[in-house]
Image (cartoon, rainbow, N blue to C red):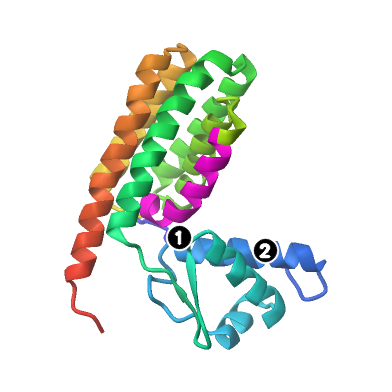
Amino acid sequence: MNLDLEAPAFSDTLAENDPPRLLHEAVVDRLRDMIVHGVLEPGTKLNERVLSAQLGASRTPLREALKYLASEGLVELLPNRGAIVAPLDRGRVKQIFAVMGALEALAGELACRNASDDAINEIRALHYQMLSHHARGDLAEYFRFNQEIHLKLVELSGNEVLASMYRGLNANVRRARYIANLSQERWNNAIKEHQQMLDALVARDGARLQKLLSDHLANKLVLVMEVLETAEKLPQP
């Protein structure tokens, strides 16, 4: 299987004469993808000159992007020393996953009560798009649709406080959720779990969907902890 781990390239429309806000958002999106997909590894020094050339953007939108990603927990800003990709702390990741598991479980139960048939069909469509990328071995695109499904399901809970809390936490552990699928066996199991979750949502079985979502995130956490523990044992360059 060929896992496509490269972050998507910018389109030709990204240029210095783009509206400043659009350029800033494009730089944020590209850098976030590079961090989440492991192109920029934890602890990597973020050289502004190199990144400006690579992304085709001046240092002003780049610095704004770094500040924004720092607020998401993906970047650390070091006084007088620039910025680095934030390390993944096992203890913090474990705590965040515990809270997210509870939020997702509650969201699933509420979504079964509150979601319209059209909204459920939207998740079904996202699910099939996700499956197509799994079949092609395109992990980056698979993960994009995977995240859309989880976020959409939380939104369908109808509870904006829950959704806002979830979005903030998820930004901090997107990298961890991504690496949980680097194992082919785990990736295949995740597909099966997503099919079960979709079936429960379609049946509006809130209790079952609640348990499936909780178990799904717990399974991811086990894999993430294994990967992070192995990485910590590797000799440092």
Query: Quick one: 106 or 18, which is closer to the camera?
Result: 106
Badge 1: few (under 14), some or many (20 or more) residues near its Cα, within 10 Å?
many
**Amino acid type, callout 1:** Val
* Direction from residue 55 to residue 79 in the image, left or right: left
- Judged from the image, the secondary structure of the residue bearing numbered disc 1 is helix
User: In this picture, which residue range is highlighted in magenta?
Assistant: 162-178
Picture quadrant of residue 189: top left
Taking the image as drawn, is residue 11 in sight?
Answer: no
Whole-number angstrom distance, CA of label 1 to CA of label 2: 15 Å
Which x, y percent locates residue 90? Answer: 28, 58
Judging by the rendered image, the residue that carries numbered circle 2 is 26
Q: Is residue 47 above or below residue 10?
A: below
Which x, y percent locates residue 164? Answer: 58, 41
Q: Is residue 175 magenta?
A: yes
Judging by the rendered image, the residue that carries numbered circle 1 is 36
Taking the image as drawn, is residue 236 in sight?
Answer: yes
Q: Residue at x 32, y 62 (%)?
A: 89
| Mark seen at residue 129 | none
Q: Is residue 23 above or below residue 137?
A: below
Picture quadrant of residue 71: bottom right
**Amino acid type, callout 2:** Ala
